[in-house]
Image (tube, rainbow, N blue to C red):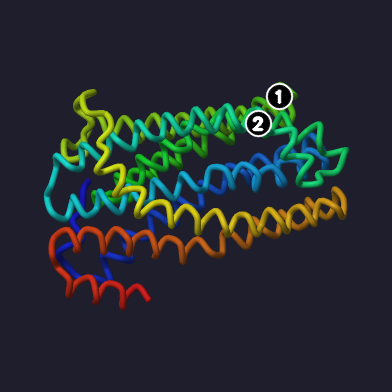
Amino acid sequence: MNKSLTEGIIWKQLLFFALPIFFSSIFQHIYNIVDSAIVGQYVGTAAFAAISSAGYIVCIVITFFVGISTGTGIIVSHFYGANDSESIHKAIRTTVTLSLAAGLILTLIGIWISPNIVHWTKTPEEVVPYSIPYIKIYFLGTVPVLLYNLGSGVLRACGDSKKPLYFLIMSSVLNVLLDILFVVSFKWGVEGAALATIISQSFSAFLVLGALIFRKPVYKVDSIRSLFDISIFKKILIVGVPVGLQSTIGILGHLIMNTKTNELGMAAIASVNAVGKINNIAWLSVTAIGHATVTFVGQNIGAGKGSRVDTGVKTAL
């Protein structure tokens, strides 16, 4: 259900809009946590360390384009607040095309340079045989990751923060079942864990795109014409590139720390990354409020309600 954030009690709107985003972020983190837990239990410490270490490598490549999708959400929220359905359609088509192209390029580059990245980050030799295949398979899921983040960003920009949560719950359950099947039953090791993740992520991307294409007409992708609008693309870059760079710099700091941790051996890698996952979850509430505020501000700017923007920002803080 679409929800306009341009009318109503501000603190309630921000809170109830942010809660599904918070739980969505929790379920996104579950992917890597479940992979790590099951692999650590049934394959061994070296495999657990490989998945933990590989997470930052994959993240630093994908995070920039997730920032671009954030830019899409901001632009779409402006259009939604202004009731400009045609511009919403153009923005969706443009960013879907961008995500497909960028995802395919990242997949090819990621698979090609995976062995070099593993060695640049000083991964211990006993972990390398697990890290390289995991990263290569994981990069095959770049397209669905970008499509999911793009699509869920559009849904949220149109006031719907619940569908992305429902889709992630379903895909997370699927991920757990596939992890058990591939790793525990089939004994496929880290390759099975990576395969379970990309299948689950593809499922969530499929659900999001289905919502965009077949559900509410306000964000319906109803034509293959005009797949790329250069003016909207420029607007998305202006907003999305700074967000992407900011996020990438943050992940880069973690990667540098991870490289130093790799020098301490397998046990240190496993320990530091286990604690890091808990720390990441602790920050999710702040991130959820931030995403809710972005959508709130975008819709109200589009609707020309500057006073609500000021009040909303103060309430969020």
> Upstream in the sequence, badge 1 or badge 2?
2
Q: Looking at this view, is 216 or 78 the one in front?
A: 78
Residue found 71% across the figure and 41% down from its top: 51
Give the image quarter of residue 82: bottom left
Q: Looking at this view, is 180 or 148 the one in front?
A: 148
Position of 44 with respect to 12 (left or right) is right
Position of 287 with respect to 29 (left or right) is left
Residue highlighted by disc 1? 185
Residue 117 is situated, as x and y percent measured from the top left of the image, at: 72, 39
Position of 296 with respect to 115 (left or right) is left
Using the image, determine if residue 186 lies above or below residue 200. above
**Kind of residue sitting beneath label 1:** Ser
Q: Secondary structure at mark 1?
A: helix
Using the image, determine if residue 29 lies above or below residue 136. below
Residue 157 is situated, as x and y percent measured from the top left of the image, at: 28, 51
Residue found 63% across the figure and 46% down from its top: 33
Disc 1 to disc 2: CB gap under 8 Å: yes
Residue 149 is situated, as x and y percent measured from the top left of the image, at: 42, 43
Q: Looking at this view, is 142 or 105 the one in front?
A: 105
**Kind of residue sitting beneath label 2:** Ile
**Cα distance between the residues tagged 1 and 2:** 6 Å
Q: Secondary structure at mark 2?
A: helix
Residue found 24% across the figure and 53% down from its top: 77
Give the image quarter of residue 4: bottom left
Residue found 75% across the figure and 24% down from its top: 187
Residue highlighted by disc 2? 180
